[in-house]
Image (cartoon, helix red, strand yellow):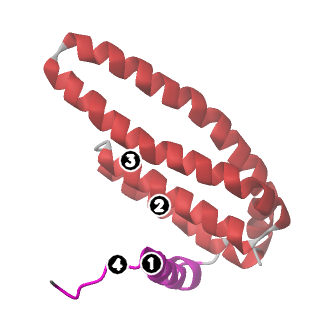
Amino acid sequence: MSDTKAPDYKSVFGQLEKMLDEYLGKKAPAMPENVKETLAAFGPYLSIISIALTIPAITAIFGLGSILTSITPYAAGLYYMNYLGVIGIIVSAVFNGLAIPGLFKRSIGAWRLMYYAALANFVGSVIQGNITSALLGALIGMYILFQVKSKYK
């Protein structure tokens, strides 16, 4: 028997958050305060819009994937990778939805749900093979997220 214990995911996500906060929140060029305030004020509405846009996208992925499976066995493999990637997108949408009430109150807990949503979206995109867009999207999204973090308590 080994004495290794399972990783503490809360600790891992917390360490990642601290590192990202250091580089994207403190060392990166700061956004003007009025831009941060505007983003924080419109954040709940942007989250609602992103969920509304995600629902048709998810249904389209499932629909297009089912067409591909009838064309070729190779496409069937891509279809299943899409399913796995869509799980990340669905998890992201759920975190976005759960965050909405707290975003209106500017709760740090809601901000953290948005952070988890961004991570889930990144993982889903990587699973689907969209590595470049996943990295670029995560970098831009996390930069914005960590710049407005000070607006949440």
Residue 50 spot, x, y in % from top left? 64, 42
Pointer 4 residue: 7
Q: Is residue 37 left or right of residue 20?
A: right
Q: Which tag is nearer the camera, tag 4 or tag 1?
A: 4
Q: Main secondary structure of the magenta part?
A: helix
Q: Amino acid at mark 4?
A: Pro
Dot 3: element: helix
How many numbered marks have been drawn onto this rendered protein structure?
4
The reply to whether residue 11 is in sight is yes
Dot 4: element: loop
The answer to which image quadrant residue 107 occupies is: bottom right
N-term-proximal mark, 2 vs 1: 1
Q: Is residue 73 above or below residue 122?
A: above
Mark 4 Cα shell of 10 Å, populated few (<14), some (14-19), many (≥20)? few
Mark 2 Cα shell of 10 Å, populated few (<14), some (14-19), many (≥20)? many
**Is residue 56 in the magenta section?**
no
The quadrant of the picture occupied by the C terminus is: bottom right
Q: Is residue 142 above or below residue 16?
A: above
Q: Is residue 112 above or below residue 89?
A: below
Pointer 1 residue: 16
Taking the spot 80% from the left edge, 56% from the top edge, the residue there is: 101
Pointer 3 residue: 125
Taking the spot 50% from the left edge, 80% from the top edge, the residue there is: 14
Q: Amino acid at mark 1?
A: Leu
**Is residue 27 in the magenta section?**
yes
Distance (Cα) linking label 4 and label 1: 14 Å
Residue 31 spot, x, y in % from top left? 66, 72
The magenta segment is: 2-29
